[in-house]
Image (cartoon, helix red, strand yellow):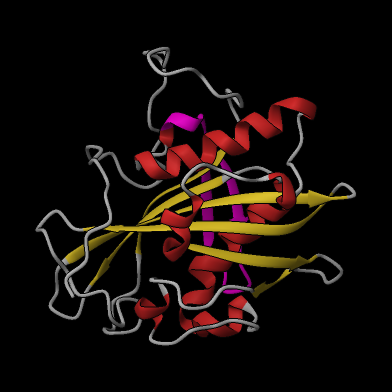
Amino acid sequence: MRGFRTAGNIVLNFASSAPSVVKSIRQRDLLNTWLRLYARQQSAPAIWEYQPERLEDELSDLIYYTVDASTPEPQLTIQSEGTRISRAYGHTGKGVLLDDYIGPRLAPFVMPIYYECAARGLPVYSIADVDDIYGRVVAYERLLLPFQTDGKVCHIIASLKTFCEDGGFEIKNLMRGNDALPRPKLRAVIERDLFHRAPGRIAAADVVEFADSSGPAVATETVELN
């Protein structure tokens, strides 16, 4: 277990996990493509090499960032617009620094996850519970994939999925529509078994390691109430 202390004196712990920690089938497919590229030289690939199948189907749930590591803390600039998750924040953010986009209230809970991905050059996966405007609990699942140029992480792609056990939910202003902060359930650095196993060969020993919760795993799909 690793710790990361933010400027706000909040300690975030990261579990050491295998790829099997990722629950969403679609996110696992994205991760598997990254792992196949990683396996060649045991380092994060270049972003131009990353061409997963059915990428077009996932674009609404993906956010592309450029990473400037010349400052004490990396600066991430949003390069995507029109994504589904922009509805959760209430507006699009293309060209805006991520910490400015999410604001000071959420930054201590969100930015260290991106910093960990950039510093380690490894995928980072997190789950947090948030409440929609009607009080329904929504699981917010984030998979971060790093990409290098000349040995430095210069890009991160985030896959963002939302799931509600009660069925439909309201995504509009999901991250800004109430006073409750996100409730972290898991933060994991994917640093073990960094290769893509063929279907049917997932070892029984692969388990989900929760950093903040011992609750049961739930199958994840994107569900939205329009």
User: Within the image, what quadrant is residue 172 found in?
Assistant: bottom left
Q: Is residue 96 above or below residue 204?
A: below
Q: Which image quadrant for residue 94?
A: bottom right
Residue 45 in the figure: left or right of residue 12: right
**Residue 213 in view of the camera:** yes
| Residue 4 in the figure: left or right of residue 150 | left
- 46 sits to left or right of 22: right
Q: Residue at x 40, y 81 (%)?
A: 89
Is residue 5 one of those drawn in magenta? yes
Report the magenta residues as a range.
Answer: 1-20
Q: Residue furthest right?
A: 150
How far across and how far down the image is residue 69, in percent? 81, 65
- Residue 74 vs 22, above or below: the answer is below
**Residue in the foreground of this view, choosing between 94 and 53:** 53
| Residue at x-position 48% and y-position 67% | 109
Q: Nearer the viewer, residue 196 or 8?
A: 196
| Residue toward you, 131 or 33 | 33
x and y, in percent, of residue 193 in the image: 57, 22
Q: Residue at x 56, y 52 (%)?
A: 144
The image shows residue 54 at horizontal and vertical percentages of: 46, 47
- In what quadrant of the picture does the N terminus appear? top right
